[in-house]
Image: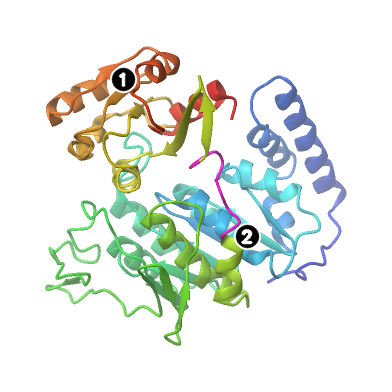
């Protein structure tokens, strides 16, 4: 690491000016009601000092977190764990491209650790700028088909970008694409956390052959590329550490996917000297992450807000909602931040929602309605959230939305 963790070297006059201008731009954006301002603030700051991200990170012990699903939650869990060892700065609201990351770090002058969520496309560049001590790679699956490269190409980019990196890479041994991406790194800690969604991982990323997948194992019969032996593992409600000790996971966040996120976070925390017991106890504090999993009151009803942005995410979300006859509201948009291509709806098994009363809202509610019709699931199309809530039978409502639809809902319910 350059610099000294916890002992920031003074910023140059140019860097100070960039930080000040960025904060001013963010404040103007907030005052105008255009969100947190972190992205515009970061853009202004980087225009004035293109090397600002590296300068802001130089005194921090940095961990980067990247994946298709679970980045924001895992970033939050790691940040909670590392607070046991010192002050943390993090882009907790998920602004995960260079501008948002720069903006977050500009507010963390006293921090010792930087826990940073990074958009998949920007991982290699941010790693180059911030010299991370650790990089957590969780999963790769299809997402934003109009914007992102095919998953194998993304894994190849990561592989090239991580080649020879000094960072400890904490990687999911159960995802062949992640293993392929991480195997160019000299220092990898493998974690077994499972892979529910396998539809992007049937061909060998190394040679293109067909992967054999007996049980939880996987290997390529043609080139010998195979699942590495993990040193950490998720086992039911416990994390197994490299010594074989089992540590209980107690979370307020629901679902198997979040236990997987906690297991990875415990392995990351250990790189920074925080023991599993301490790390996992601290993770219990997290009740919601940027509105996800929050239960809110709206129109005299309780709504649980759930985010699902792509097929793998929808699959995990279906596994944690309450069983029928719990009412479910589904909301799908296709704006820039979601990806404008909705063909991914056909990759989601909406048949799993059979028996739930379903209300459909969002900009692309008719696309979703066609998909549900084909899946043979009963539903009603509604124009607004208010109408959908009014139509829902009694009981807490599960509301599942993709990215911008989720933000629309949060604004409407005042969350």
Q: Give the residues in magenta.
A: 284-293
| Residue corresponding to mark 2 | 80
Q: From the viewer's perspective, is 300 left or right of 61?
A: left
Q: From the viewer's perspective, is 274 left or right of 107?
A: left
Seen in the picture, residue 38 relative to 320 is either above or below; the reply is above
Distance between the alpha carbons at the discs numbered 2 and 1 = 37 Å
Can you see residue 63? no
Task: Kindly state the secondary structure of the residue where label 1 is placed.
Answer: helix
Q: Going 24% across and 74% down the picture, which residue do you hit?
A: 226
Q: Going 84% across and 46% down the picture, which residue do you hit?
A: 16
Seen in the picture, residue 359 relative to 114 is either above or below; the reply is above
Q: Residues within 10 Å of mark 2 (few under 14, many from 20)?
A: many
Can you see residue 310? yes
Task: Kindly state the secondary structure of the residue where label 2 is placed.
Answer: helix
Pick the front one: 213 or 340: 213
Q: Earlier in the sequence, mark 2 or mark 1?
A: 2
Query: Could you say which disc has been placed on residue 365 in the image?
Result: 1
Quadrant of the image containing the C terminus:
top right
Quadrant of the image containing the N terminus:
bottom right
Seen in the picture, residue 92 relative to 6 is either above or below; the reply is above
């Amino acid at each position: 690491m350059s610099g000294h963790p916890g002992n920031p070297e003074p910023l140059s006059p140019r860097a100070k000016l960039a930080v000040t201008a960025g904060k001013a731009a963010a404040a103007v954006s907030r005052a105008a009601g255009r969100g947190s301002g972190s992205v515009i603030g970061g853009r202004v700051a980087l225009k004035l000092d293109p090397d600002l991200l590296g300068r802001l990170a130089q005194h921090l012990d940095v961990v980067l977190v990247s994946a298709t699903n679970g980045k924001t939650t895992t970033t939050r869990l790691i940040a909670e764990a590392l607070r046991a060892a010192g002050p943390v700065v993090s882009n907790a609201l998920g602004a995960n491209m260079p501008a948002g990351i720069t903006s977050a770090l500009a507010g963390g002058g006293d921090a010792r650790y930087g826990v940073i969520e990074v958009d998949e496309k920007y991982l290699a560049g941010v790693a180059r700028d911030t010299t991370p001590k650790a990089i957590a790679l969780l999963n790769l699956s299809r997402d934003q088909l109009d914007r992102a490269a095919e998953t194998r190409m993304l894994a190849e980019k990561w592989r090239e970008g991580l080649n020879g990196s000094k960072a400890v890479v904490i990687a999911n041994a159960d995802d062949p694409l992640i293993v392929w991406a991480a195997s160019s790194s000299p220092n990898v800690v493998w974690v077994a956390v499972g892979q529910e969604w396998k539809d992007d991982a049937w061909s060998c990323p190394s040679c293109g052959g067909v992967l054999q997948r007996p049980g939880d194992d996987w290997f390529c019969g043609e080139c010998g590329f195979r699942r590495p032996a993990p040193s950490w593992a998720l086992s039911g409600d416990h994390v197994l550490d490299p010594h074989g000790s089992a540590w209980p996971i107690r979370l307020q966040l629901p679902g198997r996917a979040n236990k997987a996120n906690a297991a990875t976070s415990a392995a990351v925390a250990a790189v920074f000297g925080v023991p599993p017991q301490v790390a996992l106890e601290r993770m219990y504090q997290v009740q919601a992450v940027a509105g996800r999993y929050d239960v809110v009151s709206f129109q005299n009803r309780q709504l649980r807000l759930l985010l699902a942005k792509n097929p793998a995410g929808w699959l995990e979300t279906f596994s944690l909602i309450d069983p029928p006859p719990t009412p479910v509201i589904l909301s799908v948009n296709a704006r820039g931040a979601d990806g404008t291509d909705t063909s991914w709806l056909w990759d989601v098994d909406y048949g799993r929602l059979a028996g739930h009363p379903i209300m459909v809202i969002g900009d692309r509610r008719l696309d979703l309605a066609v998909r549900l019709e084909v899946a043979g699931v009963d539903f009603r199309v509604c124009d607004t959230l208010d109408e959908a809530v009014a139509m829902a039978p009694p009981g807490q409502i599960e509301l599942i939305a993709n990215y911008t639809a989720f933000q629309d809902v949060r604004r409407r319910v005042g969350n």
